[in-house]
Image (tube, rainbow, N blue to C red):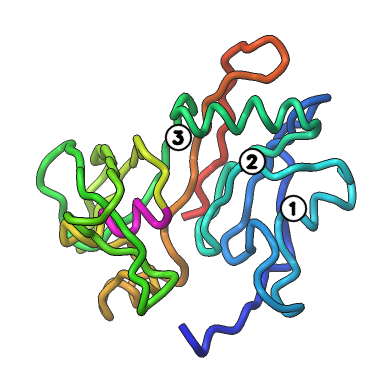
C-alpha cells in the first residue's frame, strides 16, 4: 500500500440522527473516520461533522474502505457511556458483505484469533499463538454467480476482523485491496462491506435504539 493515494469522496457523511447527546452518521466508503498521518490525510468524517457539530466526539471507527453507520457523542458523559458499551460488547452490530465464491452453508461462525502482521502493517493476520480472540457469526442472504451476499455479526471488535475472517475461510470480501485475491479485488469497484445496523443503549435514560443505513451495493 506504499503507492496509496488518499482521494476522499466529495459527498458525505450524511447525518442520520442527532439529539442532545449523540450524533449518528452514514460514513461513505473512501473517507477516513479520523485524520491520518500527514496533512494530505486530514479530511475525515469527524472533521466534516465538526462544521455543524463543533462539540462532536469520537466513539468508534470504521475502516477507510467500509461504509455505514457510525455513532458519535456530543457530550463527554455520552462519550464515556457509549465507550463502555463498546468495551463491554453491549453494542450490537450487523454488516452486509459480498464475498467471493459460493458459500454453501446457510450460516456459521469464524472463531480465529487475530494479531497485527507487523512487517505488513496495517494488515492483520490469524495467529493461534499470540492473537486476541475474535468471533464473527454470519448468515447467507443471497447467492449469485461467483459471489455470495452475507450478513455478518462481529461478536468482538478487532481491527479488520470481518475482512481477515472472510479471507481465512476462502471467501474474501469483494474489492478488498488488502486481503483479497486478484480475482476478488477486480470483482468490485470498492470494498463491499457496509455497516448496516447499530443497536445500543441511549446515554440519556438507557433505552435501546437502533440505527440503520441502506446498503449502497
Q: Is residue 61 visible?
A: yes
How much space separates mark 3 and mark 1, taking CA atoms?
Answer: 20 Å
**Residue 63 locus on image (x, y percent):** 52, 58
Q: Which residue is drawn at 18% across and 36% down?
A: 107
Q: Which of 16 and 72 is in front in this view?
A: 72
**Residue 19 locus on image (x, y percent):** 80, 26
Q: Nearer the viewer, residue 187 or 129?
A: 129
- The numbered mark at residue 201 is none
**Residue 52 locus on image (x, y percent):** 89, 46
The answer to whether residue 8 is above or below residue 145 is below
Q: Which stretch is magenta?
A: 159-165
- The numbered mark at residue 46 is 1
Q: Earlier in the sequence, mark 1 or mark 2?
A: 1
Q: Residue at x 59, y 19 (%)?
A: 201
Name the residue beneath numbered marker 2. 59
Name the residue beneath numbered marker 3. 93
Q: Residues within 10 Å of mark 2 (few under 14, many from 20)?
A: some
Q: Earlier in the sequence, mark 3 or mark 2?
A: 2
Q: Is the magenta stretch mostly helix, strand or loop?
A: helix
Q: Which of 189 and 41 is in front in this view?
A: 41
Amino acid at each position: 500500500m506504499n503507492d496509496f493515494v488518499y482521494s476522499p469522496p466529495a459527498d458525505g457523511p450524511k447525518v442520520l440522527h442527532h439529539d442532545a447527546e449523540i450524533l449518528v452518521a452514514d460514513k461513505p466508503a473512501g473517507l477516513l473516520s479520523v485524520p491520518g498521518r500527514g496533512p494530505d490525510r486530514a479530511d475525515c468524517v469527524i472533521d466534516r461533522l465538526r462544521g455543524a457539530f463543533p462539540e462532536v466526539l469520537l466513539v468508534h471507527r470504521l475502516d477507510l474502505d467500509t461504509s455505514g453507520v457510525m455513532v458519535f457523542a456530543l457530550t463527554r458523559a455520552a462519550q464515556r457511556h457509549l465507550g463502555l458499551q463498546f468495551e463491554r460488547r453491549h453494542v450490537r452490530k450487523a454488516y452486509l458483505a459480498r464475498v467471493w465464491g459460493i458459500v454453501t452453508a446457510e450460516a456459521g461462525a469464524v472463531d480465529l484469533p487475530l494479531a497485527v502482521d507487523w512487517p505488513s502493517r496495517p494488515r492483520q493476520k490469524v495467529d493461534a499463538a499470540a492473537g486476541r480472540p475474535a468471533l464473527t457469526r454470519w448468515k447467507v442472504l443471497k447467492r449469485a454467480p461467483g459471489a455470495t451476499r452475507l450478513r455478518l455479526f462481529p461478536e468482538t471488535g478487532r481491527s479488520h476482523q470481518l475482512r481477515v475472517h472472510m479471507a481465512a475461510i476462502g471467501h474474501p470480501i469483494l474489492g478488498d485491496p488488502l486481503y483479497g485475491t486478484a480475482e476478488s479485488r477486480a470483482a468490485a469497484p470498492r470494498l463491499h462491506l457496509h455497516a448496516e445496523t447499530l443497536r445500543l443503549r441511549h446515554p440519556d435514560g438507557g433505552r435501546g435504539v437502533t440505527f440503520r443505513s441502506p446498503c449502497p451495493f
